[in-house]
Image (cartoon, rainbow, N blue to C red):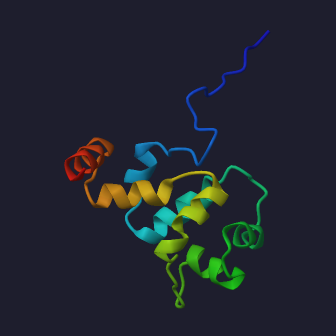
Amino acid sequence: MEQLQLRLLCRLDGPSVVPPTSINACTSYREAVRLCWQLRRVRNMTQARLAEEAGLYAPHVTCYLHDGERQRDLPGQAVARFEMACGNTAITQWMALQAKLTVLEEIQAERAAA
């Protein structure tokens, strides 16, 4: 009898963390947004459903995920809602990587400010 492997160290209260190798492969903000969408928890979620759950305008969601002449970037204030709907933090992780910020440095900065 085969045993199922369960990922016990995942977050249940929020979006999951994406492996660093996937984040390192992204070369732009748009690629990070697309990665977040590709790794969504609900595999059969449509872009219209994503727009509804994240509180976004549905035609704009198509622009966020498409590489074409009419590019439109996901607004910064919508990143958390987008990630929550998709179930992972790929965009936030990519932005932290670009800023060369680690979680430890962030905690140290908060403590120094207090």
Residue name at image x 25 percent, y 54 percent: 100
The x, y position of residue 108, in whole percent, is: 23, 44
Q: Which of the 4 image quarters holds residue 38?
A: bottom right
Image height check: is 83 above or below 68? above
Q: Is residue 25 left or right of residue 84?
A: left
- Front residue of this view, candidates 80 and 5: 80
In the image, farthest residue toward the front? 114
Placement of the N terminus among the 4 image quadrants: top right
Residue name at image x 40 percent, y 58 percent: 94
- Front residue of this view, candidates 25 and 107: 107
Residue name at image x 68 percent, y 82 percent: 57
The x, y position of residue 80, in whole percent, is: 54, 62
Image height check: is 11 above or below 91? above
Residue name at image x 77 percent, y 68 percent: 49
- Front residue of this view, candidates 12 and 61: 12
- Front residue of this view, candidates 22 and 45: 45
